[in-house]
Amino acid sequence: MPVISAIAGLSDEMMAWRRDLHAHPETAFEEHRTAAFVADHLHAFGIEPHNGLGGTGVVGTLRTGEGPVIGLRADMDALPIAEEGDVPHRSRRPGKMHACGHDGHVAMLLGAAKYLAGSRNFTGTVRFVFQPAEELEGGAKRMVEEGLFERFPMDSVYGLHNWPALPAGVFAVHQGAVMASCDTFEILVEGRGGHGAMPHLASDPLVAAAELITALQTVVSRRTSPLESVVLSVTGIEGGDSFNVIPERVRLRGTVRAFGDQIRDQVEGHIRRVAGGVAAAHGIDSEVTYERRYPPTVNHEAETALAAAAAAKVASVEHNHAPSTGAEDFAFMLLRKPGCYVWMGSGREGGENPGLHNARYDFNDTVLATGASYWGALTETILRR
């Protein structure tokens, strides 16, 4: 299935944009150069940009006659990872790199903007939303809270993410949940410190913390229905700094992933009860801090059908690909407006194919025209003349 020919002609230009962005990564809410890059190009296409929403976000508006208004979103931020690859366009900023392909997302949406501004083969309005801080900092939430949909009204909104686990030329389009929620927790276990050679005179929080880590595994295996998809991972433990001292306190941290708010409520309650019970059994105290970061990303039925129809014009479409227990702050936009979030295959044939958030990851430039064509086809599908 072909990409849009006019967009195919932009492939080299999009690749140059993408590699420039890759060489100059910026992490959450620091995307000043990236935002200026985006705004300058939108302005050159004849699309007036608005800067500063969500700190470093950019929104461009393209209107052709009266009709519906849609939003197309690309995230812009990089990750705090030191790049290990040896590509010519590798990061010039130590400790930062585009390890999730947001450089490609920006380049594809810019390519679509240039095409749509030139062709104007639609009737209605397109909002090009370039969002900061997707990586665990909630840039989408901040844009929404600062009036994204009030200042730039939209009838529906759409997102796209490259997916190396899918081959190039394939889109995965999900009905309903596509990404999980992301919650975090910290548990402070506080006892009475003492000499490591005389543990009977202390109330050891390390032993309690070790038991608590094991007990928390039962939240999923024994306290949650096997028909529910839930992940609970303890990802950190801090406590003690000497060979012969039992510390006063130990801190655990971790994450919970789920696909519905009811199960999130249940898991949070279980964590609090298990932590309290283990601490009480050891005669010490515990304190749980539970934070709900991102809600599940849930696609809407009508908009999913439109997205699938558009994707089918430029690639093949999978409808039964399993959702991911990763999280995505585009969920905040879908809580306010109907829309759809799709995955675009970006896997390479043969050779090394690192996944997302890998220090050797590099966006597959061969799919730039595919992604930009999806945006073009989606616009022309929804905003038909």
Image: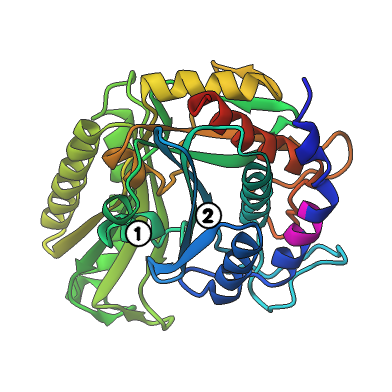
Q: Residue 135 carries which label?
A: none
Residue 344 location, quadrant: top right
Q: Is residue 173 magenta?
A: no
Q: Which mark is residue 143?
A: 1
Vertical order, 370 against 152 (above or below): above
Q: Residue 75 carries which label?
A: 2
Per the rendered image, the range of residues in magenta is 14-18
Vertical order, 19 against 101 (above or below): below
Please name the predominant secondary structure of the magenta segment in the image.
helix
How far apart are labels 2 and 1 at the CA level? 12 Å
The tag earlier along the polypeptide, 2 or 1, is 2
Which three-letter amino acid code belongs to the residue tagged 2?
Answer: Asp
The spot of residue 131 in percent (x, y) is 47, 58
Residue 122 location, quadrant: top right
Graded by Cα atoms within 10 Å as few (under 14), some (14 to 19) or many (20 or more), the crowding at tag 2 reads many
Q: Which residue is drawn at 53% across and 25% down?
A: 385
Q: Residue at x 69, y 78 (%)?
A: 93
State the SS at label 2: strand
